[in-house]
Amino acid sequence: MTTQNVERRMIMMQLVRSTNMLRSGFTIIEVLMVIVILGIAAAVVVPMASSAGSMQIRAAANMIAADMEYAKSMAISRGQSYSVEFFTATHSYRVLDPNGVLIPHPVKKGFNYEVNFKNDGRLDRVNIFSVNFDGLGKNKVTFDYLGTPYDEDGGELDNVGAVTLKSGSATRIVNVEPLTGFISIN
């Protein structure tokens, strides 16, 4: 082998190595594709990773609104007053008949209509932070045969009644409108 052949061979080997080095990296298209795939995956995962507390508080607010609607519909359909009484200390509430007695739960046969968030693993992160009917901090709302809400002393609500729920930094308020008894969630 001549010196020239050796030099040519070395140059060829260096060219092959440098070409392989260039090919060992990623193209801009490959990098962009990976970024797009990661973006799509993040868009799917982030909403699913929302805190359990925020999901629980939405469920609890919907449950309270539905249970107050149930008490109101019972009052209208039976022509008698039905009440929902809240307890912030135990984070619970119950539905009462015209005599102030717990009514049986319409779905859970053999149980009274009483809900305690701390005893329910699905809602145990939710606190009933405050209850305020008629602007006086009263903890009971009663619906008459027309669905009109009254406070625990029997006076019509003059202001919006509110049940405030908290779970971590999330807050939901279940409102009861005076006169109409319209129930909404903020």
Image (cartoon, grey):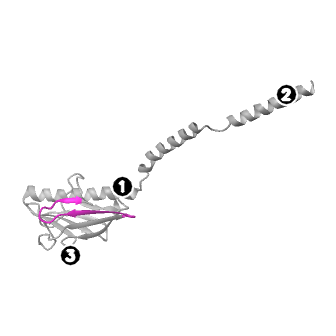
42, 67: nearer the viewer: 42
**Of the two numbered discs 1 and 2 in the rendering, the one whose residue sits closer to the viewer:** 2
Q: Which mark is residue 55?
A: 1
> Circle 3: is it few (<14), some (14-19), or many (20+) Cα within 10 Å?
few
User: Does residue 100 sit above or below 24 in this rendering?
Assistant: below
The quarter holding residue 103 reads bottom left
For marks 1 and 2, the one nearer the N-term is 2
Q: Looking at the image, which residue is at 41% across and 56% down?
A: 51
User: Does residue 28 sit above or below 175 in this rendering?
Assistant: above
Which residues fall within the magenta stretch?
A: 167-184
Q: Which mark is residue 8?
A: 2
Q: Position of residue 102 (x, y in %)?
A: 19, 63
For marks 2 and 3, the one nearer the N-term is 2
The answer to the question of whether label 2 and label 3 lie on touching residues, with beta carbons closer than 8 A, is no
Q: Which mark is residue 136?
A: 3
Q: Which mark is residue 149?
A: none
Q: Look at the numbered disc 3 and give the secondary structure of its residue.
A: loop
